Image (spheres, grey):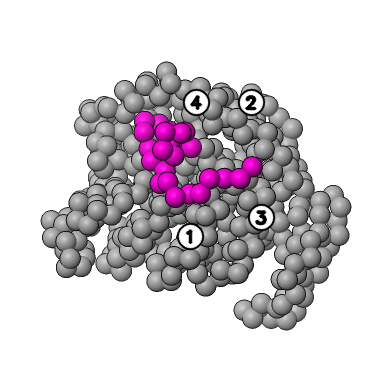
């Protein structure tokens, strides 16, 4: 199935994602390249072009990219992805600046804030940027997390820049994460996050909604007021992965709450989660020759293992091992293509919207009053003036 181009920005209405008047379901993969921080810059166009052919073969419409480099050019790469019908979900964190959960207050310094906002600026220019995550598995203060939505609004008012959807990523979906979801999503729509993502590895092998815990997961999230996406899913025990959870994720039952997800991950890495692997002909300059040869031998062994590899393809860059995981993921994605027109959620949509309109000042949070939330580090009065053509300054 050929995707339409990703030239129509994804928007949020109620608790769902929309592409124009059609509900949008994320059919994606976590995309990172070993020894490379930014896999979608113009610096790797030939490799990306090759990968896009595989994305299209899988039937993907979204990549979850962990980091982008705001200094590098992305125009050609994002255009290639747009023409292939692929959206990009990424984060505001960079290689050099991220929020340290062990010392969060000191993480909000001038260089970090500049990089965070610059990432928002340059990604906002692309129609196929699905959204930005302001936190990856990070519990932090409400005001500092909500700097990103406010800044995007200022940029829109100043120069008409698109306001990107802003989200948060949780490692699990336990009671603590549910409190954080409420904390960041309820109340004032102008400063709350727009969507929420979570990692979910609870379904293993042959299972069902009850045994896997998916039914309990739905029960915990059914009253959420914003869109929810699985940013990572697909445990690798047993191996090869069957991806039965993909069929469940895009079922009418789960589509009431979830807007799809991204399988983890595209390229094989040290944690053995990949869908494909390249047995490289060239040697990586950053590693000793013995280490490169050792990795190559292991990759060749996986390529020759018929229980692991479904197909081997000769490419200009080396032998491409297409794992059974790739085949199983594609099969289950293909089997759920009708969910875009058969989802069921209108009643729950209205209930979630009503729940979002609450007075958060009347709510009590378990971490108060021991942990007080400080004022945001951003001097918004000064920032608003400077966004109108004079640069950015942040209060320390």
Rendered position, 313 above or below 328: below
**Residue 95 horizontal/vertical position (percent):** 45, 67
**40 relative to 131 in the view: left or right:** right
Question: Quick one: label 2 or label 3, which is nearer the N terminus?
Answer: 3
Query: Circle 2 sits on which residue?
Result: 209
User: Is 333 colored magenta in this rendering?
Assistant: no
Query: Circle 4 sits on which residue?
Result: 256
Closer to the camera in the image, 253 or 141: 253
Closer to the camera in the image, 82 or 376: 82
Query: Circle 1 sits on which residue?
Result: 79
Choose top left, top right, bottom left or bottom right for residue 387. bottom left
The span picked out in magenta is: 1-24
> Does residue 42 appear in this view?
yes
Question: Quick one: label 2 or label 4, which is nearer the N terminus?
Answer: 2
Q: CA distance from mark 2 to mark 4?
A: 14 Å
Q: Secondary structure at mark 1?
A: helix
Query: Circle 3 sits on which residue?
Result: 54
Closer to the camera in the image, 212 or 311: 311
**Residue 38 horizontal/vertical position (percent):** 51, 65
């Amino acid at each position: 199935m050929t995707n339409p181009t990703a030239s129509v920005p994804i928007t949020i209405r109620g608790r769902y994602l929309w592409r124009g008047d059609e509900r949008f379901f994320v059919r994606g993969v976590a995309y990172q390249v070993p020894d490379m921080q930014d896999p979608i810059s113009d610096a790797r166009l030939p490799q990306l072009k090759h990968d896009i052919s595989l994305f299209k073969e899988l039937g993907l419409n979204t990549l979850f990219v962990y980091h982008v480099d705001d200094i590098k050019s992305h125009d050609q790469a994002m255009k290639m992805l747009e023409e292939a019908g692929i959206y990009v979900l990424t984060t505001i964190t960079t290689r050099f600046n991220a929020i340290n959960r062990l010392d969060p207050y000191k993480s909000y310094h001038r260089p970090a804030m500049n990089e965070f906002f610059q990432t928002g600026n340059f990604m906002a220019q692309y129609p196929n940027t699905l959204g930005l995550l302001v936190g990856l598995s990070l519990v932090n203060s409400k005001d500092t997390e909500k700097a990103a939505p406010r800044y995007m609004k200022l940029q829109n008012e100043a120069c008409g820049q698109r306001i990107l959807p802003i989200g948060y990523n949780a490692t699990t979906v336990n009671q603590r994460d549910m409190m954080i979801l409420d904390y960041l999503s309820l109340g004032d729509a102008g400063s709350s996050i727009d969507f929420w993502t979570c990692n979910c590895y609870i379904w293993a092998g042959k299972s069902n909604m009850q045994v896997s815990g998916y039914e309990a997961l739905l029960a915990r999230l059914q009253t959420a007021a914003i869109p929810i996406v699985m940013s990572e899913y697909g445990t690798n025990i047993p191996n090869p992965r069957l991806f039965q959870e993909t069929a469940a994720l895009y079922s009418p039952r789960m589509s009431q709450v979830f807007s799809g997800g991204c399988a983890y991950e595209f390229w094989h890495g040290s944690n053995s989660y990949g869908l494909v692997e390249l047995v490289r002909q060239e040697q990586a300059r950053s590693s000793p020759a013995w280490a490169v040869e050792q990795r190559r031998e292991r990759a060749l062994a996986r390529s020759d293992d018929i229980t692991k590899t479904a197909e081997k393809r000769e490419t200009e860059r080396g032998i491409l091992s297409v794992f059974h995981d790739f085949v199983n993921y594609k099969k289950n994605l293909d089997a759920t293509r009708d969910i875009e027109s058969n989802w069921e959620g209108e009643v729950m949509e209205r209930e979630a919207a009503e729940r979002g309109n609450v007075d958060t000042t009347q709510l009590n949070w378990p971490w108060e009053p021991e942990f007080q939330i400080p004022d945001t580090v951003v001097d918004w009065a000064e920032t608003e003036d400077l966004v109108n053509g004079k640069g950015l300054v942040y209060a320390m």
